[in-house]
């Protein structure tokens, strides 16, 4: 008998093109996933994927079963969302965001409103690259992620094919973040060539390494002539604090996501656009279209959209 998880396995294998990567994303072992695929094919008496040295290629039968898998997952998601269509006090909302002072404050101010105090609203931070998978699996209702102007068209196509909807909130240049006493802090904008004389500090996940030269960093050109500081940071809070103590280094980031950073608000750090980088950072929210939207989720989306609309207009904070 076909198990429900088999349909999720089918989608993930098709999406990644390899059993190894699919197993990694599903948090199961590769042998277990291979065995599950054989069980599905034996049950259906068809071949779903052709194996090769580079991974797997979906067959015609596989494409049809993939369609069924999406339909079944969509129905399961709708069933799960029944609880979300009850009265507001009974509703729950889970939010997953990349590390961002602004999003943390938006969550705090929204959940503290009187009408939402009895609702269960959870907030989790994780690296940007893991959030899409969490939304796809239905493990979170709303994901806050970023992409770039050079990648968004291709990403949107892939996300839409997987039943995901990404709505941009803000588009902005990449900024160099500097101590206010840094030699470059006097400028209104900087160029790559000016930054190369200083150490770049990054979170651990963005540090280049043998297996992932520019892990989670959409601008590999930053690494070409930059000295990446050997200090390792697990989070951007510690990194920002280190910046306030040193005048000879910098990091990069999105200004809109750090509007409420206390080190920025106190004047210790400054955001300066990198003007010869023509690619923009695009931050937005992602939802799984297989789930019915509910009142609490819509209220939060309206709240963050209003905030970024104000920011895009005049940079005002509107908690």
Image: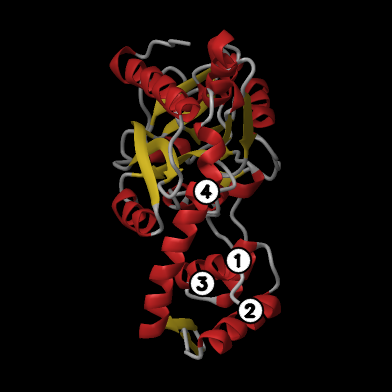
Considering the numbered disc 2 on the image, is that residue within a helix, a strand or a loop?
helix
Instruction: Tell me if mark 4 has few (under 14), some (14-19) or many (20+) residues whose alpha carbon lies within 10 angstroms of its own.
Output: few
The numbered mark, 3 or 1, whose residue comes first in the sequence reads: 1
- In the rendered structure, the answer to whether residue 237 lies left or right of residue 80 reads right
Residue 247 in the image: state x and y as whole percent: 60, 24
The reply to whether residue 266 is in sight is no
In this rendering, is residue 112 above or below 22? above
Q: Are marks 4 and 1 in contact (CB under 8 Å)?
A: no
Q: Quadrant of residue 67?
A: bottom left
Of the two numbered discs 4 and 2 on the same chain, state the one appearing first in sequence: 2
Label whose residue precedes the other's in the sequence (2 or 3): 3
Q: Which mark is residue 79?
A: 4
Residue under circle 2?
A: 36
As helix, strand or loop, the secondary structure at mark 3 comes to: helix
For discs 3 and 4, the disc positioned in front in the rendered view: 4
* CA–CA distance in space, label 4 to label 2: 25 Å
Nearer to us of marks 4 and 1 is: 4
Residue occupied by mark 3: 10
Q: CA distance from mark 2 to mark 1?
A: 10 Å
Q: Is residue 108 left or right of residue 318?
A: right
């Amino acid at each position: 008998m076909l198990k429900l998880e088999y349909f999720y396995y089918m989608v993930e294998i098709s999406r990644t093109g390899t059993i190894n990567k699919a197993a990694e994303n599903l948090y199961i072992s590769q042998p277990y996933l291979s065995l599950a695929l054989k069980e599905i094919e034996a049950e259906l008496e068809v071949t779903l994927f052709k194996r090769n040295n580079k991974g797997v290629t979906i067959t015609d039968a596989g494409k049809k079963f993939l369609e069924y898998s999406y339909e079944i997952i969509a129905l399961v998601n709708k069933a799960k969302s029944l609880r979300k269509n009850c009265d507001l006090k009974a509703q729950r909302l889970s939010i997953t965001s990349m590390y961002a002072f602004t999003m943390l404050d938006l969550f705090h101010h929204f959940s503290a409103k009187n009408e939402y105090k009895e609702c269960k609203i959870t907030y989790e931070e994780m690296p940007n690259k893991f959030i899409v998978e969490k939304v796809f699996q239905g493990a979170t209702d709303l994901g806050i992620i970023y992409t770039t102007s050079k990648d968004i068209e291709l990403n949107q196509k892939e996300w839409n094919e997987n039943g995901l909807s990404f709505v941009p909130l803000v588009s902005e240049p990449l900024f160099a973040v500097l101590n206010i006493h840094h030699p470059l802090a006097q400028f209104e904008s900087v160029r790559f060539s000016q930054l190369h004389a200083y150490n770049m500090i990054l979170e651990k996940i963005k540090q280049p390494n043998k297996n992932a030269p520019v892990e989670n960093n959409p601008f590999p050109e930053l690494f070409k002539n930059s000295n990446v500081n050997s200090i390792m940071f697990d989070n951007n809070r510690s990194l920002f604090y280190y910046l306030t103590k040193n005048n000879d280094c910098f990091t990069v980031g999105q200004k809109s996501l750090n509007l409420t950073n206390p080190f920025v608000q106190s004047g210790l750090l400054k955001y300066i656009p990198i003007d010869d980088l023509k690619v923009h950072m695009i931050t937005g929210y992602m939802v799984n279209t297989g789930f019915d939207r509910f009142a609490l989720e819509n209220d939060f989306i309206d709240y963050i959209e209003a905030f970024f609309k104000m920011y895009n207009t005049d940079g005002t904070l509107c908690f």
